[in-house]
């Protein structure tokens, strides 16, 4: 079984953001969608629901139970399914956390460069930052300084981190939890990329049981199910009780069916995808060395996204140059941090042929 082998002409028939946002001659390697066929078990479950006209409202806690079973199997983490509530997706979950745990004008801490919605969900609040270290890891000293100086009400943590791909260690997470506890800061940990990281990942509430924190997670990213909306907010009753319960009505029944099936029956698919992505990261580094040796990339532990420093090329705006001249589109670094002008984020959940072609277009735009 090979996951990332869908031909380019078939991918171009898709109607999602990745394949429709830019001009037809542009090779899209930006938004976090996988160039893959979904797991057969997931496809079959949705087809069966349609054939049965099973298209009503969700009722049973099957998603909560499936996530609990997966967490126990993958990480040895046990949580009570009653501590998990449904929500449409992780971005909605983050926004609901901001609304529930802060007041207008309160401060919210983030770690740039970071996934752009971390900023947009904090609208109406004052954002403060503790930037990631140059090696892409958490800067614990900067986090502590931000807690002391700015006294944020909420810390939005990205775990694993997008775009750097850092998988936070148990020691890092426990240090964060100790600092948050000492300074009275609630933590909301977005863990949507966690399943792909496998045992390298540690859930925040496993590292810090009893912490004043919630985990916001979903099967959507790692099984490529963004069109089938469902996610979970997991945490203690004291915090969940502050979240508007109506948000649970926003989860799609088909999303719940698909995600539940992925968590229970799609583990072999994910293991294969993870193996191919790890290999793609190595391949990407090797192809850069071969075709565009001015640039280098060190494979990250988490996500299927490469955070690439293009400053050796001396371009004013590398991402725009690659799009306009090379006809290959990456996410611009400035989407993740205003200071990341020389970075692009590259989607490696794709075939070797597409990765090779993407680098060829980069190199030809320079040479």
Image (tube, grey):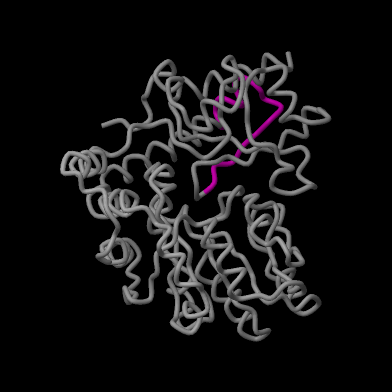
Residue 228 seen in the figure: yes
Using the image, determine if residue 286 lies above or below residue 214. Answer: above
Residue 267 seen in the figure: no
Q: Nearer the viewer, residue 301 or 329?
A: 329
| Left or right of residue 61, residue 197 in this image | right
| Magenta residues (range) | 285-300
Q: Position of residue 65 (x, y in %)?
A: 27, 66
Could you tell me which residue is drawn at 50 percent across and 50 percent down?
301
Q: Position of residue 10 (x, y in %)?
A: 39, 19
| Left or right of residue 145, residue 158 in this image | left
Q: Nearer the viewer, residue 247 or 211?
A: 247
Which image quadrant is residue 99 in? bottom right
Quarter the C terminus occupies: top right
Could you tell me which residue is drawn at 46 percent across and 33 percent down?
280
Which image quadrant is residue 293 in? top right
Could you tell me which residue is drawn at 74 percent across and 68 percent down?
142
Could you tell me which residue is drawn at 44 percent across and 82 percent down?
237
Which image quadrant is residue 62 in? bottom left
Quarter the N terminus occupies: top left
Q: Position of residue 317 (x, y in %)?
A: 79, 31
Is 294 covered by the magenta stretch? yes
Using the image, determine if residue 291 lies above or below residue 222. Answer: above
Using the image, determine if residue 228 lies above or below residue 297. Answer: below
Q: Nearer the viewer, residue 80 or 144?
A: 80
Q: Position of residue 140 (x, y in %)?
A: 68, 69
Query: How many circles with numbers are drawn on the protein?
Result: 0
């Amino acid at each position: 079984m090979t996951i990332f082998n869908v031909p380019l002409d078939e991918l171009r028939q898709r109607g999602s953001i990745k394949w429709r946002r830019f001009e037809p001659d542009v090779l899209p390697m930006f938004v976090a969608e996988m160039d893959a066929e979904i797991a057969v078990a997931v496809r079959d479950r949705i087809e069966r629901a349609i054939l049965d006209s099973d298209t009503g409202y969700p009722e049973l806690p099957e998603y909560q139970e499936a996530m609990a079973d997966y967490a126990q199997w993958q990480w040895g983490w046990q949580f009570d399914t009653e501590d998990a509530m449904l929500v449409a997706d992780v971005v909605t979950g983050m926004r609901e956390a901001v609304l529930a745990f802060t007041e207008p004008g309160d401060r919210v801490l983030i770690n740039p460069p970071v996934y752009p919605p971390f900023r947009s969900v904090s609208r109406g609040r004052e954002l403060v930052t503790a930037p990631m270290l140059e090696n892409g890891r958490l800067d614990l000293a900067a986090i502590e300084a931000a807690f002391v100086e700015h006294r944020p009400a909420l810390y939005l943590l990205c775990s694993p981190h997008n775009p750097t791909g850092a998988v936070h260690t148990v020691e890092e997470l426990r240090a964060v939890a100790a600092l948050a506890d000492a300074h009275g800061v609630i933590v909301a940990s977005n863990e949507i990329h966690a399943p792909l990281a496998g045992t390298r990942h540690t859930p925040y509430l496993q590292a810090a049981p009893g912490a004043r924190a919630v985990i916001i997670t979903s099967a959507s990213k790692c099984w490529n199910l963004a069109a089938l909306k469902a996610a979970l907010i997991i945490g203690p009753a004291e915090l969940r009780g502050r979240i508007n319960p109506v948000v649970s009505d926003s989860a799609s029944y088909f999303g719940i069916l698909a995600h539940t099936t992925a968590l229970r029956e799609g583990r072999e698919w994910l293991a294969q995808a993870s193996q191919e992505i790890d290999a793609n990261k190595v391949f990407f580094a090797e192809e850069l060395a071969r075709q565009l040796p001015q640039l280098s990339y060190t494979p990250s532990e988490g996500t299927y996204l490469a955070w690439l420093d293009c400053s050796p090329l001396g371009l004013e705006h590398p991402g725009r140059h690659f799009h306009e001249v090379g006809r290959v589109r990456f996410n611009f670094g400035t989407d993740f941090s205003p200071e990341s002008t020389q970075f692009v984020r590259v989607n490696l959940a794709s075939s070797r042929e597409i990765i090779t072609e993407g680098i060829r277009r980069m190199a030809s735009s320079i040479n």
